[in-house]
Amino acid sequence: MNENKSEITERIFSGCRSQIGAEAWENLLEMFVSVQGPEEFPDILEREAAGLGLPEYLPELARLELAVNEAGSSNVASDATVSRLIINPSLWLHRFSWRHLPGLLRSTDCDPAPRPEKGGEFVLLWRHPVSGELKVCSALDEDLLVLKIVAEGIEPRQAAAEGNVPIHVMDAAIERGIRKGLLLGPASGICRERSVFSTEMEIDERFRFVSAFTLQWHITHACDLHCRHCYDRSHKEPIDLNQSVALLDDFDGFCRERHVRGQISFTGGNPFLHPDFLTIYRAAAERGFSLAVLGNPVPAGWLEKLTAIQPPVFFQVSLEGLPEHNDWVRGPGHFARSLGFLDLLAEFDIYSIVMLTLTGHNIGQVLPLAEIVKGRADLFTFNRLSLVGEGALLALPSKNEYQAFLYAWAEAASDNPALGLKDNLINIVRYRKGLQLFGGCAGYGCGAAFNFITVLPDGEAHACRKFPSPIGNVVRESIAEVYGSDAAKSYRAGCKECRSCAIRHACGGCLAVAYSLGLNPLIEKDPYCFY
């Protein structure tokens, strides 16, 4: 047998080689002299393994290694651009009579694989559509389930009903299949128009395509607090329960048609004061949405009820500075109640966010507050006051004060991962330091009417809750019509003065702050911009 053929055999079947001694391997190579190619090696093992005292599983391991080699040289395309959910064309699925064979392909002395066991097992082999990496693993039950759903054209909702599981469980399984590369899914149908940016600008595409869309739903304006910066204390009669369920169905259709995950952030007022809150929350969970709450501290009983339905992905509460100032803004005892509530959220394993509205009054208290909530809140972040509603009676910091604060915050955040990056203008600091830009306020720079909309109790829809930005009404119109309105398009295009900026795709300033300072936010940029 010539040397080249020996090298090829050892390269392809290195896993088999590692399972037997040198003498047995040389004997196999001698038997391989007269065969035409490596595809016959598994058959030789099948015939000779018992006589040579080789492991029974070796022929199947050889077939797996041969498949890996063939897949590595295959030209089967796995283009990620598809119009519907499909199985990755490069996927190879085979049933073996031995378990744990894939582990032998990557086993080392430091990390030994489980020994093969007699028993049926499906093995998956595929090329990941994004990384291009060749993957091989034992198939999980979930993998086989999502492959069956797609191969047989079963609707996820039908599969969930037949399996007696919530639809969000099925949606999550399919999403994991897409992330693994077993399935190819359509691209998001929500994309920032290229015309928003200067024609010569290089755009990071991850800031253009939306993977999740949020409905920030103020289901009631009723509230047990009277905060000094409240944006809107007007009375708006909430839509009834039937209209609420219809809104959930409409939102479900909107997200599925655009191939994005839907999230609903329930807020108010205080959403827990809505008489049908739990019923609406349950209906939203049944439709597979991720759910979050932006509200005030509540007793443990409420958290028990929520988690029994579906644990919220996060619960956000607000603190406005150190105890004295916070309680001046939000009412006596609020600071202490909020700290205790953060501990309660931890007991329920609910991700906690503390949000602060930054003003000229509390700018010096933010970083000291960060030290107080460190270890109690999972995330602490802030946004700037918008001088609308009762917030018009307060004051913003000066531009110089704010710029200095952003540098201090960015520096502190580098050592404290719980300090969240939210204000778009932090990207100016990162850009100047040569750091990677982050997603800004909503993950895509300003997300107003782009990857979220706000719905008020009566169904009135706005691009952003922090300033009057009406784009329609979800009772009289579908969400698709609201999202496609000329008003919504204007808000998501953002400020015209920002369009030639090198970091526009991850920034866009704050439209609400510009509006509240008397500017036209669709034309004039955030006055705090220091780019």
Image (cartoon, rainbow, N blue to C red):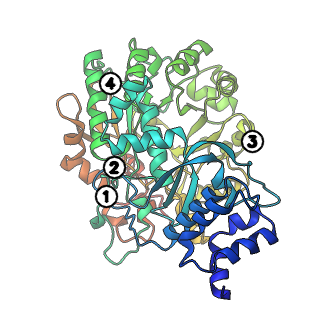
To which residue does mark 2 refer? 85
To which residue does mark 3 refer? 371
48 displayed left or right of 226: right
Give residue 315's quadrant in the image: top right
Q: Position of residue 357 (x, y in %)?
A: 54, 40
Nearer to me, 365 or 288: 288
Distance from Cα at disc 1 to Cα at disc 4: 38 Å
Distance from Cα at disc 1 to Cα at disc 3: 48 Å
Classify mark 4: helix, strand or loop: loop
Looking at the image, is mark 3 or mark 4 earlier in the sequence? Answer: 3
Residue 124 visible in the snapshot: yes
Q: Position of residue 15 (x, y in %)?
A: 69, 64
To which residue does mark 1 refer? 82
Distance from Cα at disc 3 to Cα at disc 4: 36 Å
Looking at the image, is mark 3 or mark 2 earlier in the sequence? Answer: 2
Vertical placement of 184 versus 160: above or below? below
Looking at the image, is mark 1 or mark 4 earlier in the sequence? Answer: 1
Classify mark 2: helix, strand or loop: loop
Give the amino acid type for the residue marked by disc 4 in the picture.
Answer: Pro
